[in-house]
Image (tube, grey):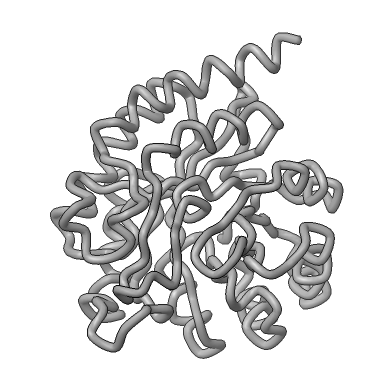
Amino acid sequence: MNKTVHDLVANDRNNFFLMAGPCVIEGEEMALRIAERIVSVTDRLHIPYIFKGSYRKANRSRLDSFTGIGDEKALRILRKVGETFGIPTVTDIHETAEAALAASYVDVLQIPAFLCRQTDLLVAAARTGKIVNIKKGQFLSPEAMQFAAQKVVDAGNENVMLTERGTTFGYTDLIVDYRGIPEMQRFGFPVVMDVTHSLQQPNQASGVTGGMPQLIETIARAAVAVGADGLFIETHPEPSIAKSDGANMLQLDLLDGLLTRLVRIREAIMAE
């Protein structure tokens, strides 16, 4: 039976939920190690947790960029992570044919920001019955995301989440407008702040995306302060050797302290 959004994010502490994991599945041992560490932290802090890992990276800067270890192999690892720790999992899809395949392994299908207007992709994801997390395009206003969400609803699936991940600012930078979080919440869906992707520095001359991981806590604190329902954080034991998006990922051993401080902010807000 497919999970609903409520199943994933409900929490008796009224805490934010977390979508976190490596940018891309690099191997089984790494995925299980990351999941085990995050589960130990989120269980202690009563944070609903969804393990994130891309089974394949389609949006790469160069032809020689790492894309994955093989679709079926990576999807089987995602399923094993979910079954081992009893947690839901999320991965992104890029073409309509991928929706049914990925849906047989994970609980949430994620629509990449660049593809958030692709009607056929949104409808294919919706028809799997899985939760659909739509990332806001770097080129769209928050208000425009109501139409992306409505496509999923009109296709018969009301289990939608929306994710803010920054807006293009010039050629090589992104900026977060926090007004977008309450604006998108007006549509009636949980809104997530993609902390790490909003700190990317795309389109670098080297062909490798840059980032500003030193600002991860700043972005996350602000998101919790304005009432984001969830946070999305890519993390890796050694970001410097990660095969994708290492420049903006959080080092895994820093996650515990970060989440502990963020929970305090959430508690202060809820106590008002």
| Residue located at (79% from left, 68% from top) | 153
Depicted 237 relative to depicted 70: above or below: above
Query: Residue 93 at what x, y percent from top left?
Result: 49, 76
Residue nearest the viewer, comparing 159 with 263: 263
Residue under the point 82% across and 47% down:
183
Q: Which part of the image, by quadrant, shows the C terminus? A: top right
Query: In the rendered image of this protein, does residue 166 appear above or below residue 24?
Result: above
Of residues 176 and 109, the one drawn nearer to the viewer in this rendering:
176
Left or right of 193 on screen, residue 64: left
For residue 149, above or below residue 7: below
Q: Position of residue 99 (x, y in %)?
A: 52, 80
> How many numbered marks, from 0 up?
0
Instruction: Give the quarter of the figure containing the N terminus.
Output: bottom right
- Residue that appears at 44% across and 60% down: 201
Give coordinates of residue 270: x percent, y percent: 70, 16
**Residue 60 drawn above or below residue 258:** below
Which residue is pictured at 47% across the width and 69% down the height? 92
Q: Is residue 194 left or right of residue 86?
A: right
Q: Is residue 116 left or right of residue 104?
A: right
User: Quarter-wise, where is residue 10 in the image?
Assistant: top right
Residue 203 x/y as whole percent: 44, 72
